[in-house]
């Protein structure tokens, strides 16, 4: 059994950063941007990621609570309970500050919807992704959180 699958306790931020570095250094890794597609509708941005079987991806640090949708496939993903094997279709909440890793057992499609009227991908990333764990504690982030709450109130 894969060591990644044996974890039964939450993965620390330090462990996640170490895993991310190890994945970057692995030969033959896929470019996650090439596997990502972006969809827009009125006030909604949807990020869709295709992960081929056998690939490990490490996500970014999330600034907001949002949903993660496993549309198809089976994946081992880090959660608050450790590493869990999830087969789609499945939906779970990803909380502020989460940085997840996933190992695709089969080809997988994962989606994350976000409430925004923005369509510029750079601005969307600034809005929903923190550059570091330290950035989550800044006043700029707290102001952003207020802006997102206001957007939700408008709908």
Image (cartoon, grey):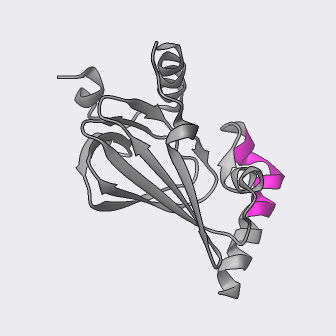
Camera-side residue of 55 and 138: 55
Work out whether 141 lies above or below 54: below
Please, is residue 73 above or below residue 142 in the view? above
Image spot of residue 114 (x, y percent): 58, 65
State the extent of the magenta-drawn residues as a range.
Answer: 135-144
Q: In this view, does 137 lie to the left or right of 37?
A: right
Q: Give above or below for 28 relative to 6.
A: above
Where is residue 11 shown, x and y percent of the image?
41, 33
Observer-nearest residue: 14 or 108?
108
- Residue at position x 71%, y 53% in the image: 121
- The stretch drawn in magenta includes residue 25: no
* Residue 139 relative to residue 47: left or right: right
Q: Nearer the viewer, residue 29 or 25?
A: 29
Q: From this viewpoint, which residue is outermost toward the left?
A: 1
Quick check: is 138 in the magenta stretch?
Answer: yes
User: The N terminus is located in which quarter?
Assistant: top left
Reply above or below: 45 against 17.
below
Name the residue at 23% across, 27% down: 6
**Residue visible at 73% across and 78% down in the picture:** 150
Q: In this view, does 48 lie to the left or right of 96?
A: left
Residue 130, by quadrant, is top right
Please provide percent x and percent y for residue 41. Answer: 60, 75
Q: Main secondary structure of the magenta part?
A: helix
- On-image quarter of the C terminus: bottom right
Q: In the image, what residue occupies the spot 33% across and 46% down? A: 108
Question: How many marks are shown on the rendered structure?
Answer: 0
Give residue 111's position: percent from left, percent from top: 45, 57
């Amino acid at each position: 059994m894969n060591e990644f699958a044996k974890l039964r306790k939450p993965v620390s931020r330090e462990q996640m950063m170490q895993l991310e570095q190890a994945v970057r250094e692995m030969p033959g890794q896929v470019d996650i941007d090439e596997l990502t597609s972006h969809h827009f509708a009125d006030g909604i941005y949807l990020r869709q990621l295709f992960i081929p079987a056998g690939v490990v991806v490490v996500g970014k640090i999330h600034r907001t609570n949002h949903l993660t949708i496993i549309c198809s496939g089976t994946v081992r993903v880090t959660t608050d309970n450790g590493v869990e094997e999830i087969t789609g279709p499945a939906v779970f909440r990803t909380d502020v500050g989460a940085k997840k890793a996933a190992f695709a057992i089969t080809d997988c499609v994962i989606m994350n919807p976000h409430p925004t009227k923005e369509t510029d991908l750079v601005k969307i990333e600034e809005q929903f992704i923190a550059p570091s764990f330290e950035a989550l504690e800044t006043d700029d982030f707290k102001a952003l959180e207020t802006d997102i709450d206001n957007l939700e109130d408008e709908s």
